[in-house]
Image: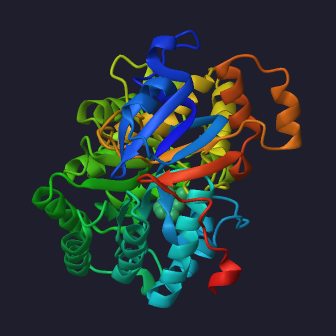
Amino acid sequence: LLLRGRLLSFHRAPESLADTASYLYEEDGGLLIEDGRIAKAGPYAAVKAAAAAEVTEVDHRPHLILPGLIDTHVHFPQMQVIASYAANLLEWLNTYTFPEECRFVETAHAERIATHFYDEFLRQGTTTAVAYCSVHKSSADAFFAEAMRRNMLMVGGKVMMDRHAPQGLLDTPQLGYDETRAVIEQWHGKGRNHVAITPRFAITSTPEQMRAAQALAEEYPDLHIQTHLSENQEEIRFTCELYPDATDYTDIYARHGLLGKKTLLGHAIHLSEREADVLAETGSVAVHCPTSNLFLGSGLFPLKALARREKPVRIGVATDIGGGSSYSMFKTLDEAYKIQQLLGERLDPLESFYRMTRGNAEALSLVDRIGTLEEGTDADLVVLNAAATPAMRLRMETVSTLPEELFLLQTLGDDRAVVETYVAGQAGKSTLVAPSQRE
Ligand code: GUN
Ligand code: FE
């Protein structure tokens, strides 16, 4: 398969809008895909010359071709929680989220939602997501089986939680350990699946369960670990009461050996300097969930301040569906931009597009596979049209630079701007089956 269009891929984090050396931009670009991987990327004429004479060609001009978008924190069982009217995190969890997650004890429900989950991500141009399943092993089975069917690179885990939630959502230290182990043995490395060790957060895990998570982390040191950290003041207070020996919230995870380069910490909004140092020193990733942090009134994540520390904190960006209020990574970075505005900081559009592609791949330590258009990596791609709606088309008339076009996509764009999504070289958006035809 040979794609023609305007290629954009980042080599590293851009330092400013003038940092043209941080990315590849090919106005008339070609992308040769063989066996689901990028075989060659560059000027169309050169790539065409290297391709077989009978190669299938798709001309996406004048649209942009980027690496598929990546979402580093999302809750698979919360598709029917999005848009729940709650005052704050703990009320939202107890009133809407925990009851909904209880329904995932039914395999048929988990399988139905899994179908919608992947459909929606492809519609939004997101080709990789890092997901929490529910406490039920069968929810992880449904999640990973559907990822394999679609050949998508997904990271996910059975949630471990053994207190402070309804009975139907509780495992035990032993059961959480055994079932997580079973999910790893059954799914990790199958297809493109990655299993993450997933203690939900310190409130819902006893110290015994934290030690079980620690045992798993020691047994499987290459796996991702995901949990939540310092999202809401009331949550932080309650957490520190539950773990009185810990110095602070971050120290709870540190003491249980859960920090490191493969650890993803959702939210991490209200960190002390000491905690930010610990994240930086361990290489742990703070995952910014802007729409969720605004929707639940959790707080303003200091993205720019954390990134430019003497000891920088690694950062991912994510939707946090269903606390988050949009599946779109454009909307996510649009809200991230506004949060930085309120903090007196600038988040430029080159950095935003870096963060939703290569930046998130780096946060996952998966940049050798996804997040760029580099040769040999997986052909997960998104094709974008910055003139997708009448209002966007009108505004495009006055746009003259690439950063302006990206900023327009981020500010006004949504799934309508996603012309096509490719998963391992296969068209994934245009081939979606309408739900009405399926059910
Ligand atoms: N903290 C613990 N669980 C959750 C969750 O499901 N969503 C959010 N936003 N925060 C959490
Ligand atoms: Fe979350």
Q: Is residue 167 left or right of residue 209?
A: right
The image shows residue 267 at horizontal and vertical percentages of: 49, 46
Front-most of 50 and 380? Answer: 50
The image shows residue 438 at horizontal and vertical percentages of: 62, 83
Q: Is residue 94 visible?
A: yes
In this rendering, is residue 216 above or below 236? below
Quadrant (top left, top right, bottom left, bottom right) of the C terminus = bottom right
Q: Please state the total of marks drawn on the protein image.
A: 0
Q: State the residue at coordinates (63%, 74%).
A: 95
Q: State the residue at coordinates (37%, 69%).
A: 148
The image shows residue 136 at horizontal and vertical percentages of: 38, 81
Q: Is residue 390 left or right of residue 304?
A: right
In this rendering, is residue 292 above or below 335? below
Q: Is residue 230 visible?
A: no
Q: State the residue at coordinates (40%, 19%).
A: 309
The image shows residue 252 at horizontal and vertical percentages of: 29, 51
Question: In the current view of this chain or complex, which residue is farthest to the front?
Answer: 53
Front-most of 36 and 12? Answer: 36
Q: Residue 206's image quarter? A: bottom left
Q: Is residue 305 left or right of residue 430?
A: left
Question: In the current view of this chain or complex, which residue is farthest to the top?
Answer: 18
Q: Is residue 335 left or right of residue 206?
A: right
Question: Coloured how?
Answer: rainbow
